[in-house]
Image (cartoon, rainbow, N blue to C red):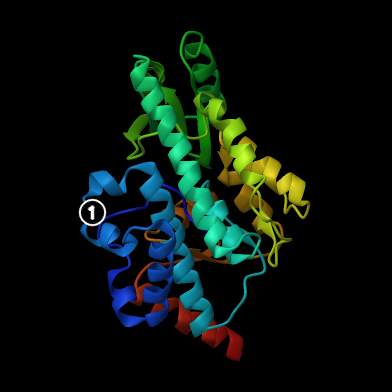
Amino acid sequence: MFPGQGCQFVGMLLDLYYNHTIIQKIFQKASNILEYDLWNLIQKGPLKKLNITYYTQPAILISSFAIYKLWIQKNNIIPNIMAGHSLGEYTAMLCSKVISFHDAIRLVHYRGKLMQEISFSLKENNIDGYFMQAILGLDKILIQKICKQESKNNIVNISSYNTYNQVIISGNKNAILRVVNICKSLGAYSIPLKINIPSHCLLMKPIVKKFKNFLNNITFNYPKIPIVNTLNIKCETSLKKIKYNLIHQLYNPINWIECIKYISNKNINNLLEFGPKNILAKMTKKIFNNLDVISINNSKTLSIALKKYNYMRII
């Protein structure tokens, strides 16, 4: 499992970087493509810059990919299936060799740039702003109805179904606040997200044409490892459908609940998260608490996972 935006922080991967040459080489290679020092950015920040989407997306992509490559180097246990949350789907495609290292970086940087442009455009046109909030403790069907009710004059919709108890909403600020206030009056509580764009929201539709044109210049290959698509909850093999899903993912919600249910129904009980934090591990355990989930994000968690899976391979 590979996470999306929101898991970044200044100082991530520090001990892994200094203890493993493979991490250092991957960051150096990425920095050469990006033409700035990616490692320096994630270690020194400032956080405000790291949180800008076209910096955030390459930072998370490369961090997650580097941890995965370290895992393969140490253990060489290849996953039976992969999944990514939003941006994490691009990391899965990179690890499954659907896209090359160079193209993966180009793609997420351009994706982040387009998404950031939408944010700037909203400000320039004096639209009330945008952000994303997590809402916890309320039925998703009820939240859907509230969003529909409050989106008559502004855009607001569910952008991610994370757990049975948590959804993310995205859109114009005023509409978001109205939805949040109604949900709070019904007993829910909310958490603002550190994401400065309205992800997986209808506000993203204007960038579709540019993104589609960019995708047409990227070489796609058939997945070496199946990837569960969080849009239609399938392991696509058609390159046309893979591209289609990436385009439509921009303004449609992520369904992490159904994604994990799909994986669980395949009788897969052992999951690993590769990324700076353990966000997906926490979410996944709330969907099915009987799943064995480890998030590898530092030397300690790497050691725990290696010990567990080396032992399982022996027996």
Secondary structure found at label 1: loop
Q: Nearer the viewer, residue 201 or 280?
A: 201
152 up-or-down from 93: above or below: above
Location of residue 309 in the rendering, given as x and y in whole percent from the top left corner? 53, 81
* Foreground pick, 183 / 157: 157
Query: Which residue reaches farthest bottom?
Result: 314
Residue at 58 percent across and 65 percent down: it is: 95
* Quarter placement of the N terminus: bottom right
Question: Residue 202, located in which quarter of the rendered image?
Answer: top right
Is residue 91 visible from the viewing direction of this image? no
> Residue 118 at what x, y percent from top left?
44, 28
Report x, y in % for residue 314: 59, 91
Characterize the local packing of mark 1: few (<14), some (14-19) or many (20 or more) Cα atoms within 10 angstroms: some
- Dividing the picture into quadrants, the one containing residue 208 is top right
Please count the marks in the image: 1
For badge 1, the amino acid type reads Gly
- Residue 301 lies, in percent from the top left, at 38, 73
- Answer above or below: position of 250 versus 280: above
Does residue 7 appear anywhere in the picture? yes
Q: Residue at x 34, y 71 (%)?
A: 298
Residue at image point 29% right, 58% down: 42
The residue lying furthest to the right in this view is 238
State which quarter of the image contains the C terminus. Answer: bottom right
Q: Is residue 55 left or right of residue 312?
A: left
Q: Is residue 307 above or below residue 262?
A: below
Instruction: Say which of 290 and 93 sits in front.
Output: 93
Residue at left offset 62%, top offset 61%:
82
Residue that mark 1 sits on: 45
> Is residue 311 rendered to the left or right of residue 113?
right
Check the image and report above or below for 40 versus 133.
Answer: below
Q: In this view, which residue lies farthest toward the top?
A: 153
